[in-house]
Image (cartoon, helix red, strand yellow):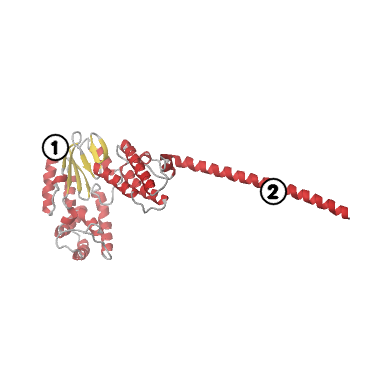
Amino acid sequence: MVFGDGYPLKAGADWLRNTLKPLMAKRLPNVYYAGFTQNYIPEFVKKHKITHPYFLKIDIQKFYPSVSHHALYVQTLLSYKCLLGVASVPKGFKQKLSPLYMEFIAQLPIVDYGLPLNSSISKTLAPMLYVPFFLELKKQNEYKFLVFVDDILILSKNKKASTQAYYNMYNYLRAVDLHININKLQQGRFQAAVLDYCGWHFAGGYCTISTPKIMAFKDKIASICQNKTFLDTRLFIKKCNNAIHGFGHYYKYGNVSGLFEKLDANIRANVKGWYKRVGRKIPTNIDLVESGLQSLTNIKKGIKRPISSSSTFHKQLQEKLKIEKHKTELLFQYLESMHNQNKTIISLLERIDKHFV
């Protein structure tokens, strides 16, 4: 279900976010609300997997389509109260939320259940469904947790605590009319099992990229390179670079050096295929670098531009200066020749003038 927010819903969503964001940042910084930095997830796992070696990864089944409208409203009020740490919901918050929420629900095509995916109000309110659970879990030293929309990761000190966290989460979600997706459930110990979370793959002490995300990136590059509508090479290279930058900067914090080299080779092969399909000369790897094509390896190393682009620029500048210098020398030679010719002509005119006088 796709649904956009117009005024006044957009203004209401801004008010909600501005009200809840500082509270979430203070009380539940590990629940995605104000945004995570690109290295937040791998650093979180690296930091806590020694003291909390057991993981439990839970995915909520059909999260947005399954959200109960009544449960979301009640949980939002309860969550705000819990975030503030007060005994009852502040009257002003409830008076402002109620009409806004009723207007939002009234515009939805489905009664009782389901939230639109691209609604700012949906994104603002959805995390409120499990705020009370994680506020309570935070009090227990047995656990560390990370929540990204409907992907929940709970780290535990032992297997028993991990199992208990599963049952507690299961019962809590059922109380708000949500269910765990059993097919995506992952549980184990970091040293012996693998974990896929938000595109990251954790196994054997290493953090790399999950296979579905690798395949999706390859498909995206292939799709760009199979498009024959690009008439300008610069626009084509820019389109490729946009995909490379987004993927590379998100995953550069993992153990991905070898993988990035392989993906770079795949990118170059696809790009050369585009040149062939549009009937242009197939470039060498050096030509691709000089054309501005970025590489994942350079992003991993922190190189902002292709290595040879700077040297190529200076080489082209030097060649241009040589040409300009040569042109200047020719111009001076021509002027000197004209000057000598003029002197000869003037001398002849003076001799002729004296003869007739």
Task: Check disc 1 and report its element: helix, strand or loop.
Answer: helix
Q: Label for residue 159?
A: 1
Give x and y (percent) for residue 336: 71, 46
10 Å neighbourhood of mark 2: few (<14), some, or many (≥20)?
few
Q: Amino acid at mark 2?
A: Leu
Task: Check disc 2 and report its element: helix, strand or loop.
Answer: helix
Tell me if residue 116 comes above or below residue 318 in the rendering. below
Give the spatial CA distance, label 1 vs label 2: 92 Å
Q: In this rendered view, identify the residue nearer to me: 242 or 300.
A: 242
Tell me if residue 249 comes above or below residue 124 in the rendering. above
Give x and y (percent) for residue 20: 25, 55
Q: In this rendered view, identify the residue nearer to me: 87 or 253.
A: 253
Q: Which residue is mark 2?
A: 335
The answer, for residue 305, to whether it is visible in the render is no
State how many labels appear.
2
Q: Amino acid at mark 1?
A: Lys
The answer, for residue 231, to whether it is visible in the render is yes
